[in-house]
Image (cartoon, rainbow, N blue to C red):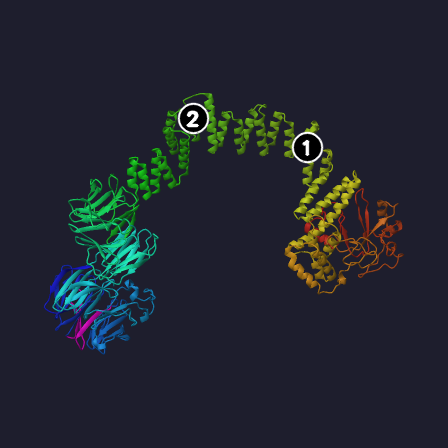
């Protein structure tokens, strides 16, 4: 920092106060009993204002610039307009000491020896408030809410806008240390953390009540005649320690943005301080006390008012103190801090020195900072290139005077005019060099630790190289003009110099030859990654020069200080920036001269993707495959990489024809005609033809051939057809294939697109000897259901077997049968698929006849068996039951020829049909969350199924599900004995994990129940009236009379039916006629009636049997018994032959029972009617309800 006097004026009287107009255009001066108004642009006196009768002590300008005020020893305050007219005057009881305008409301505070007043333009009167001591200074907070008063007794009083005291700050020293000047920092955002506290900021745009004192972040600077400077928060809390001044301060004033403080007083000079009170230097020395000082708004100008009447105007010039090494830039901030910035990663670190930073030097991991009384040496914490943590390595506590400072790995270099001194980090002077002229530039150019080299430029034009361990300087060259800037190339073979005439000169260090020079340069830098590139700046332009090519320019403000790859480090005013500069221009300069390797090196520094593509293309055309390959890898162009790899492989095999390689390159680039010429030139016509074919350039291919050979024409037509097919132009492709004689390919295209008219025309034109194309046509006709055309083709070919198969596939059975009548060898080919088709459509009788005609009588049974097996596998047990019933009936039909075998299958299938019909309900109950069946029905079903699963269970039927369902329903209905038995059975089986927990719990809980079954569930035999246990070792027969139970096919309750048999000499027709002769009179009652004796009912007498016999004794009836029966009490299962009819007598005529006339299953009539309404068919055999019996 340095200051220069821009104006100086001497008045006759003491200058007590100064004030700038807010826009800085005018300066108001309190001089004697006059108020002087100066123009700050040229320092001329605009007008002296006379209105006071005694000395003017204070002046202040309103923030809006419309008025200003002056206070005098004559006890009066005068309000002046910006046009220098007095508009108001009011008085106090004592002399006026200070005035201050509120920055927001423009309220004026005027302070005298005994009181202070508050006046605003809206008020007619001035409100005055008494104080206990003389007021020496005052100031408003930034938001205008509070007024601070400095007093003679050492007290600072904080008042609100109404004059009420809110905070009282009592300074140590009391009246012996009067407060002489105070000022609020105008911008607290710039305060350092050492003197600021974290306060919550309230949105100034919200309509809230005024902030409390604790919520304010205004900082008050207080200077007293105890020679101390202190800082306070508005709440009265002191921030930091007192700063000792060693003089009596008369004035303290912040810069407009609060970054610095100007102070003057008894030391007869104005000094500059940081915002936290660190002294930076002297602004200007005077011959008397500096009574007042002010900073011009938003500028670096300072004005002083002295006791001897001197008014001095100074401009402060803050020089840039900085250092750069590669991508690390260190610079001074706020005069006392050093910021180190990583120009690549944009990381920053701040080093607080708390003293004026005079010089900065940075090199590798070292950072040197010169302070007024010492030099600090820092080093990086680690070797990581991105590490930004610096720590103090050494302190040299000694005052040095130098123009330039340089740091090396183990030394610091001090430059003072002509002298260079090399000091170790312990302040030991190791070397000293005395130059023949003033040193203008010095730079470390690297080297081993402790042996670094320095590049030194002198005012007389000499350029030297000095090694820190060598006492002798080496003269590199000497020019006639003074050196302004220097840089050496990476290989240290070239030297760039900017002289005092702003000319950039580049020398070859070895030969001392001037390689070239360029005008308009103020700084220069070599590219650290490319030997032949440098850049220099000047006249608002950045100039980049590669090798000996012309300079490439672009606009750039500032000075170039470094060049690394594609980044140029530019210093503009006080900021350093890393500018990304594409290296396209120098790269293209190299490409123009076909210097591909050098162009690639430039591209690696940073160019666009398009530039990389251009480089790759140019290198490829120049047959520099190595460079082209690296460039194409960069842009990830796999197509060209494959080409280069193939060329390299061919080279390895011994190929060396560069023109052939170039032809391939041209073909890849789309330069087809050039490629064809080269192919012909190298004798590879076939490659040209293949290229044109692949590109569908048939016209060019014809021109290239220059031939009318029909073979060639046909070949071209075929290729053109292939292209049309691939180009999704199928009709054109088909026509071309037909023209070229490729019938099969044409048929494929026509058939795929379904052009039947075109296909039938083609088929009719083909000769019958062309069987393959004709067969393919027939296939497409079949595909699109044009069976007539297909039949026409097969007839044309005479292929009767294919014709038969066509009719079979199309289900045209009549046409197929007519062919079979003429050609019996195709009988199996027709009737077997016909029978299968009938079986699939549930036309089993017709299927049987068809199988019989084909000689495969059991085929229908196999088909149904397969359907049944599929239903079981898919857990469709209701369908399985139906299919087994169908199988049984089919077997019964066939049984007339194979009686024994088919009847055995009939009974087996009937049994399986009933089991799967029952298990369907159990499976649904176990697998679905809800069941539509009542617990009693599920109980009966499970018990019936359990009795029939004593041996191996049929496929798909789970014993676990059956027993678990039986156990759960038994427990629910009170059949605890059955439940316990079922659970015991379950313990011997493998239980699925999903049932395990619930089964174990149920098994335990059922043991707590009585070991008996509910009597309501005990079934009774209707023949012998014996109550049977629920778990019967006889299965589904009575334990006493062995009479089989007849169950309802829906609820599986025992029906009151007893099967009876006819005597041998009675036929079925006679039995029916006897039963129909007379309907006997039967007495009914709502309750159970027991037949009284055999005389009343002959059939009842037939029910008796020998007690205790193990063999089953059937009920055998004669003609008399038959005549006694009522037709409505008898149910007859009229089985077809060879089975016999079955007869059943109902013992409870009131119980209505219905038998399905198709499957002969018995139902309670109400259940049957409900199920028929639900399904519109029999629930067992699925006979439609409207189908005749």
- The quarter of the rendered structure image containing the N terminus is bottom left
Residue at position x 66%, y 46% in the image: 873
Q: Which element is circle 2 on?
A: helix
Q: Is residue 655 above or below residue 531?
A: above
For the residues carrying marks 1 and 2, which lies nearer the camera in this image? Answer: 2
- The quarter of the rendered structure image containing the C terminus is top right
Q: Which mark is residue 742?
A: none
Q: Position of residue 292 (x, y in %)?
A: 17, 68
Q: Position of residue 822 (x, y in %)?
A: 69, 27
In reply to whether residue 92 is colored magenta, the answer given is yes
Label 2 crowding class (10 Å Cα cut-off): few <14, some 14-19, many 20+?
few
Q: Is residue 1030 above or below residue 651?
A: below
User: Which residue is disc 2 drawn over?
Assistant: 686
Q: Nearer the viewer, residue 108 or 1151?
A: 108
Q: Is residue 959 visible?
A: yes
Quadrant of the image occupied by residue 1016 = bottom right
Horizontal relation, residue 875 to residue 638: left or right = right
Q: Which element is circle 1 on?
A: helix
Q: Nearer the viewer, residue 1165 or 238?
A: 238
User: Which residue is disc 1 drawn over?
Assistant: 830
Quadrant of the image occupied by residue 180 = bottom left
The residue segment tinted magenta is 74-102
Looking at the image, the residue that sits furthest to the left is 12
């Amino acid at each position: 920092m340095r200051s220069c006097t821009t104006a100086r004026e001497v008045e006759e009287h003491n200058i007590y106060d100064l004030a700038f107009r807010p826009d800085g255009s005018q300066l108001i001066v309190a001089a004697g009993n006059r108020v002087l108004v100066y123009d700050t642009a040229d320092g001329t006196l605009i007008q002296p204002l006379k209105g006071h009768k005694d000395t003017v002590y204070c002046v202040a300008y309103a923030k809006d610039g419309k008025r200003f005020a002056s206070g005098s020893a004559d006890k009066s305050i005068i309000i002046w307009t910006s046009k220098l007219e007095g508009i108001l005057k009011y008085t106090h009881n004592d002399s006026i000491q200070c005035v201050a305008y509120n920055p927001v409301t423009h309220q004026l505070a005027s302070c005298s020896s005994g009181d202070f007043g508050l006046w605003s333009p809206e008020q007619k009167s001035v409100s005055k408030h008494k104080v206990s001591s003389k007021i020496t200074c005052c100031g408003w907070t930034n938001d205008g809410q509070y007024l601070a008063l400095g007093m003679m007794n050492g007290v600072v009083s904080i008042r609100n806008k109404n004059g009420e005291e809110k905070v009282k700050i009592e300074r140590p020293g009391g009246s012996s240390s009067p407060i002489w000047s105070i000022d609020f920092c105008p911008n607290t955002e710039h305060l350092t953390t050492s003197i600021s506290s974290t306060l919550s900021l309230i949105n100034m745009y919200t309509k809230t009540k005024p902030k409390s004192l604790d919520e304010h972040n205004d900082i008050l600077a207080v200077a007293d005649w105890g020679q101390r400077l202190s800082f306070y928060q508005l709440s009265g809390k002191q921030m930091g320690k007192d700063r000792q001044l060693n003089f009596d301060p008369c004035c303290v004033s912040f810069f407009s943005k609060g970054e610095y403080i100007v102070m003057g007083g008894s030391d007869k000079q104005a000094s500059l301080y940081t915002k936290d009170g660190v002294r930076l230097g002297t602004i200007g020395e005077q011959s008397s006390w500096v009574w007042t000082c002010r900073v011009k708004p938003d500028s670096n100008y300072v004005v002083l008012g002295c006791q001897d009447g001197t008014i001095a105007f100074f401009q402060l010039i803050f020089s840039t103190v900085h250092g750069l090494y590669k991508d690390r830039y260190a610079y001074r901030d706020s005069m006392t801090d050093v910021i180190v910035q990583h120009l690549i990663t944009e990381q920053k670190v701040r080093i607080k020195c708390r003293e004026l930073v005079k010089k900065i030097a940075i090199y590798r991991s070292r950072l040197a900072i010169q302070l007024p009384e010492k030099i600090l040496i820092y080093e990086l914490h680690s070797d990581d290139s991105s590490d930004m943590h610096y720590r103090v390595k050494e302190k040299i506590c000694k005052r040095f005077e130098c123009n330039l400072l340089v740091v090396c790995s183990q030394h610091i270099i001090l430059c003072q005019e002509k002298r260079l001194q090399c000091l170790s980090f312990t302040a030991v002077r190791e070397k000293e060099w005395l130059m023949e002229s003033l040193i203008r530039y010095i730079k470390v150019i690297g080297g081993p630790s402790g042996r670094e080299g320095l590049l030194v430029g002198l005012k007389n034009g000499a350029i030297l190289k000095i090694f820190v361990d060598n006492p002798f300087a080496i003269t590199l060259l000497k020019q006639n003009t003074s050196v302004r800037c220097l840089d050496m190339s990476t290989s240290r073979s070239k030297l760039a110099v900017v002289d005092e005439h702003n000319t950039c000169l580049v020398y070859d260090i070895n030969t001392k030859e001037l390689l070239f020079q360029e005008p308009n340069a103020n700084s220069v830098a070599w590219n650290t990654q490319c030997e032949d590139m440098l850049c220099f700046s000047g006249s608002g332009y950045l100039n980049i020069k590669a090798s000996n090519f012309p300079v490439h320019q672009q606009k750039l403000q500032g000075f170039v200080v470094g060049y690394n790859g594609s980044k140029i480090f530019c210093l503009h005013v006080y900021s350093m920036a890393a500018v990304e500069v594409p290296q396209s221009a120098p790269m293209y300069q190299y490409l123009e001269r076909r210097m591909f390797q050098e162009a690639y090196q430039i591209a690696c520094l940073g160019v666009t993707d398009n530039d990389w593509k251009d480089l790759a293309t140019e290198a490829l055309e120049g047959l520099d495959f190595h460079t082209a390959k690296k460039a194409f890898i960069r842009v990830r162009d796999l197509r060209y990489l494959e080409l280069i790899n193939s060329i390299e492989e061919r080279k390895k095999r011994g190929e060396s024809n560069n023109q052939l390689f170039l032809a391939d390159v041209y073909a890849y680039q789309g330069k087809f005609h050039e490629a064809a010429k080269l192919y012909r030139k190298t004798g590879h016509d076939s490659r040209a033809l293949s290229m044109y074919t692949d590109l569908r350039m048939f016209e060019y291919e014809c021109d290239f051939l220059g031939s009318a050979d029909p073979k060639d024409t046909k070949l071209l037509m075929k290729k053109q057809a292939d292209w049309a097919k691939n180009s999704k132009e199928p009709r054109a492709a088909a026509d071309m294939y037909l023209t070229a004689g490729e019938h099969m390919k044409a048929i494929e295209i026509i058939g795929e697109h379904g052009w039947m008219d075109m296909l039938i025309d083609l088929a009719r034109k083909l000769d019958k000897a062309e069987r393959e194309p004709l067969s393919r046509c027939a296939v497409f006709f079949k595909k699109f259901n044009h069976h007539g055309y297909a039949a026409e083709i097969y007839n044309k070919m005479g292929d009767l077997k294919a014709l038969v198969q066509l009719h079979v596939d199309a289900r045209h059975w009549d046409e197929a049968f007519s062919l079979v009548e003429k050609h019996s060898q195709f009988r199996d080919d027709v009737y077997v698929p016909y029978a299968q088709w009938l079986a699939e459509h549930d036309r089993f009788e017709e299927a049987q006849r068809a199988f019989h005609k084909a000689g495969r009588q059991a085929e229908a049974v196999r088909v149904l068996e397969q359907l049944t097996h599929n239903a079981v596998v898919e857990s469709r047990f209701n369908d399985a039951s139906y299919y087994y019933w169908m199988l049984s009936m089919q077997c019964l039909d066939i049984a007339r020829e194979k009686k024994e075998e088919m009847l055995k299958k009939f009974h087996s299938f009937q049994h399986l049909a009933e089991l799967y019909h029952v298990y369907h309900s159990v499976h649904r109950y176990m697998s679905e969350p809800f069941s539509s069946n009542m617990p009693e029905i599920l109980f009966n079903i499970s018990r019936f199924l359990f009795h029939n699963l004593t041996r191996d269970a049929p496929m798909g039927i789970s014993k676990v599900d059956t027993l678990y369902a039986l156990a759960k329903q038994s427990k629910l209905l009170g059949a605890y004995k059955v439940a316990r038995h079922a659970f015991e059975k379950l313990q011997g089986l493998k239980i699925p994990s999903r049932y395990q927990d619930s089964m174990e719990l149920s098994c335990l809980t059922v043991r707590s129940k009585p070991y008996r079954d509910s009597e309501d569930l005990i079934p009774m035999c209707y023949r012998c009236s014996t109550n049977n246990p629920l778990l019967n070792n006889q299965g589904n027969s009575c334990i006493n009379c062995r009479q089989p139970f007849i169950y309802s096919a829906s609820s599986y309750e025992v029906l009151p039916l007893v099967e009876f048999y006819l005597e041998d000499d009675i036929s079925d027709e006679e039995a029916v006629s006897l039963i129909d002769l007379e309907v006997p009179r039967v007495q009914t009652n709502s309750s159970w009636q027991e037949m009284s004796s055999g005389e009343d009912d002959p059939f009842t007498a037939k029910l008796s049997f020998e007690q205790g016999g193990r063999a089953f004794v059937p009920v055998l009836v004669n003609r008399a018994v038959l005549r006694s029966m009522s037709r409505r009490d008898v149910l007859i299962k009229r089985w077809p032959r060879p089975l016999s009819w079955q007869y059943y007598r109902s013992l409870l005529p009131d119980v209505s029972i219905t038998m399905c006339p198709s499957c002969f299953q018995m139902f309670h009539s109400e259940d049957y009617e409900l199920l028929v309404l639900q399904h519109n068919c029999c629930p067992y055999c699925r006979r439609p309800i409207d189908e005749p019996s």
